[in-house]
Image (tube, helix red, strand yellow):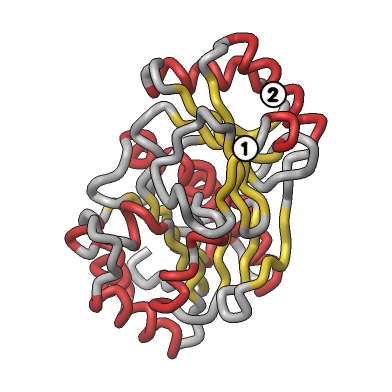
Amino acid sequence: MSDWKPKLIASDMDGTLLRSDETVAPATLEQIRLWGEDGVPFVLATGRPPRWMVDIREVIGSGTAVCCNGAVMLDLGAFEVVHERPVAPEVLQQITAGLRAAQPGTWFAVEYGLEFRHEPVYQPRWDVNAPGVAQATLEEMVSAPVAKLLARHEDLSREEFIALVHEVVGDLATVTNSSSDALVEISALGVSKATGLADVCAELGITAGDVVFFGDMPNDVAAFHWVREGGGRAVAMGNAHPEVLAAATDVTDTNDEDGVAAFLRSLH
């Protein structure tokens, strides 16, 4: 594939595009600019909700962001949600009841639109007092569709909790994770970064074989499989989770070594 060139560049954010200090390297921005001049768009594919995309919008500018692990398509320029694949209330109610029964120490939060709601006992790790963030009862949170359900446990290990959630949720929804602690992200059944990127590609008239996608955590694995099976390039960061490394077609440098820039430079 030495002469292969992408028609779309897609990247995860945390641990991938972003350095540890949450900046984007000048070399990476330069590569995005150069490929853009050749007509190759750049798309973000992240577990982050739309409300966490304000800062990156100032850096990247216009374009498309696949947020909430594929559930939300955001127009960065207009900062508008253009498409959403939410989890239905009846599914939310069944999952939360099942998890609470199986492990009473499970606490919940939800993302929808530009809003975040969490149970009073749920302990957010970021933007606790940010606009759009508020406490709510579980009954209130599961009464309307949401982009993403978050389940957290403060005592179980990450591996124990992920296994429990998979067992309880079964085929009701899609379960993934991108955190080092016992935090699980739950999306509508079949929704992943792969489906979000496929939606973007369908609008552009290109296929997975035209895509290079960079990632580092288990919530990137579905997109890696989609890209790889389609003949594209699934590029794991040097700091990637073992599951991501196993699914990759290529491995680049770490995020702090500007791995995205290095790989894109090699394709010119």
Q: Residue 77 appears at what percent x and percent y?
A: 57, 80
Q: Which residue is mark 1?
A: 149
Of residues 243 and 211, the one nearer the viewer is 243
- Give the residue displayed 65% in from the left and 22% down from the top: 169
**94 sits to left or right of 216:** right
Q: Residue 97 appears at what percent x and percent y?
A: 70, 18
**Image quarter hosting the C terminus:** bottom left
Q: Residue 6 appears at what percent x and percent y?
A: 46, 71
Q: Is residue 213 visible?
A: yes
Q: Among all residues in the image, which is located at the extreme bottom?
A: 37
Q: Residue 168 appears at what percent x and percent y?
A: 63, 16
Question: How busy is the neighbourhood of tag 1: few (under 14 within 10 Å), some, or many (20 plus)?
Answer: many
Q: Are marks 2 and 1 in contact (CB under 8 Å)?
A: yes
The quadrant in which residue 178 appears is: top left
**6 sits to left or right of 95:** left
Q: CA distance from mark 2 to mark 1?
A: 10 Å
The quadrant in which residue 67 appears is: bottom right
- Give the residue displayed 59% in from the left and 40% down from the top: 135
**Image quarter hosting the N terminus:** bottom left
The numbered mark, 2 or 1, whose residue comes first in the sequence reads 2
State the SS at label 1. Answer: strand
For badge 1, the amino acid type reads Leu
**230 sits to left or right of 3:** right
- Give the residue displayed 51% in from the left and 16% down from the top: 105
Number of marks present in the image shown: 2
Q: Is residue 163 above or below residue 265?
A: above
Q: Which residue is mark 2?
A: 95
For badge 2, the amino acid type reads Ile
